[in-house]
Structures are given as C-alpha cells and as structure tokens.
C-alpha cells in the first residue's frame, strides 16, 4: 500500500494533537506535532530574549533541535513537554509563527522529516497536525481534515488542560487569549489559518474524542479501499 500523508488542521484547543496521535497509532503512521515544533521554537526564542532580526530568526530555526521521544518533547536537550503548553509559550508561538522566515524554515524541516520516513519505510504514512499543513506544507496530501469547535467549547477544554498542569487561570482569561490567537492565526499575511479547499470539515464540539477518531479513521479506510478496488 502506498505511503499516505494525512493532514489535520484547526485552531488552538480543538484537540488536534490527541486526534492525530491516536489516528497515527491506528494506521501505523508517524505522528508529527507541528504545533509542538513551533512551541519549541517559541520556548528557545524566549530564552534568547525574543530577537526579531532575520539573522537571529534564521539561526534560531536552523539550530534549534527538536526530538519527540514517546510522549515527551525534547528541545535543545531539555524536556519541555509541560512548559511549551503554558499560556505564556502559546502566546509566543503565535507571534513567532507569523514570521515568514520561520514558517519557511519549519516547512522545509517538516517536509524533510516526512521524506526521510517515506524512504526508510519505517511507517505506512505520516499524520501531521497544525495550522497550515493541508494548505501550505502538504497541499497535495490525499487526506485532509479541518477540525473545529466554538471558542467557548475550546476554552473550556483548554481551561481543564491548564488546571491539570497546575496553572492558575480562569475561564474568561483563557477564552480571551484563545480568541486573540484565533484572530492572529486567521489574519496573518503568511499561511493564515483556514481549511484547505478539499478538506473534510469535522466539528469536534458535537462529538466525543472517540467519535472524532472513528469518523476520520473510517474515512481514510473507506477511501483507501475504494482506491484499491479501482486499481
């Protein structure tokens, strides 16, 4: 069976990471958390004082080393799994992702990672989640999904996530930050957040996590089955 690329795009707090990770496991695919990659850059950028010169940004993108080990995220030999999910780093990730130079560097890294896996034949495909995977990074992907939910539902989910990690935040604060990031992501000049023209839209606000996974999995398997019959 041919190597498949599955893209899952959507706004923050919609559950993309959980969905993508589970789908990748079900389909024996590599899971690539591109959001975590940008968050790692944001974390590293913050430790350097957030310089905005082209030279500094290019150096940041080229030299930051990101490794996924099971469910841990290692950035420059530091376990940043929990820290990159804080509201502080989320805000920085939204800002740094707006720099064209950074997006170009990350796009190349993501494509190179998938190509390496394709050649190694270590997985049957790759599942990537983010903001512009189906529109910019892999516009020719056979399977494209855009998952969404209302800001209020996403804020509630995000609030629970932050509280579990020990952050002292309230609902209105989280909702305000989420809406601000939505606006930034949707209105940036480079690779704005939007569904690909051929993406399947999934409203996660109306489904359980298992329900969302079942929908995506069934779609992929059905399309692959149809493709095999035609061939």
Image: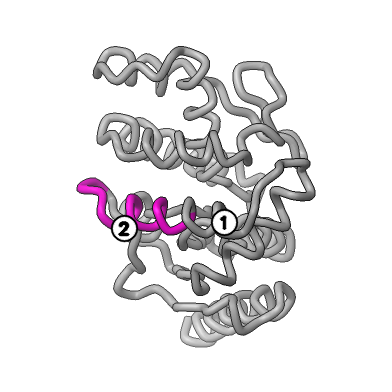
Please tell me how many numbered marks the rendered image carries: 2
User: Magenta stretch containing residue 185, yes or no?
Assistant: yes
User: Could you tell me which residue is drawn at 51 percent across and 70 percent down?
Assistant: 147
Q: Position of residue 222 (x, y in %)?
A: 58, 84
Point out the tag, 2 or 1, that comes first from the N-terminus: 1
Dominant SS type (magenta): helix
User: Could you tell me which residue is drawn at 53 percent across and 81 percent down?
Assistant: 223
Q: Nearer the viewer, mark 2 or mark 1?
A: 2
Name the residue carrying label 2: 186
- Label 2 – label 1 distance at C-alpha: 22 Å
Name the residue carrying label 1: 127
The N terminus lies in which quarter of the figure?
A: bottom right
Q: Where 72 falls versus 210 (above or below)?
A: above
Q: Residues within 10 Å of mark 2 (few under 14, many from 20)?
A: some
Is residue 97 rendered to the left or right of residue 214? Answer: left
Question: What are the residue bounds of the magenta stretch?
Answer: 178-190
Quarter occupied by residue 125: bottom right
Q: Where 223 falls versus 35 (above or below)?
A: below
Q: Residues within 10 Å of mark 1 (few under 14, many from 20)?
A: many
Q: Position of residue 44 (x, y in %)?
A: 52, 21
């Amino acid at each position: 069976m041919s190597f498949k690329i599955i893209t899952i795009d959507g706004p923050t707090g919609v559950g993309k990471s959980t969905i993508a990770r589970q789908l990748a496991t079900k389909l024996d695919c590599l899971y690539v958390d591109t959001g975590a990659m940008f968050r790692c850059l944001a974390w590293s950028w913050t430790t350097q004082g957030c310089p905005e010169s082209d030279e500094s940004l290019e150096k940041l993108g080229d030299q930051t080393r990101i490794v996924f080990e099971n469910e841990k995220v290692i950035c420059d030999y530091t376990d940043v799994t929990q820290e990159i999910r804080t509201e502080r780093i989320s805000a920085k990730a939204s800002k740094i992702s707006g720099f064209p130079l950074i997006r170009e560097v990350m796009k190349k890294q993501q494509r190179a990672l998938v190509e390496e896996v394709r050649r190694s034949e270590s997985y049957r495909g790759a599942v990537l989640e983010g903001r512009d995977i189906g529109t910019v990074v892999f516009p020719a992907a056979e399977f494209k999904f855009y998952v969404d939910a209302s800001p209020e539902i996403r804020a509630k989910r995000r609030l629970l996530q932050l509280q579990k990690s020990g952050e002292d935040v309230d609902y209105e604060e989280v909702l305000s930050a989420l809406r601000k990031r939505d606006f930034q992501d949707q209105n940036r000049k480079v690779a704005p957040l939007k569904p690909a023209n051929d993406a399947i839209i999934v409203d996660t606000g109306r489904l359980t996590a298992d329900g969302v996974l079942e929908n995506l999995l069934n779609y992929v398997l059905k399309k692959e089955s149809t493709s095999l019959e035609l061939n």
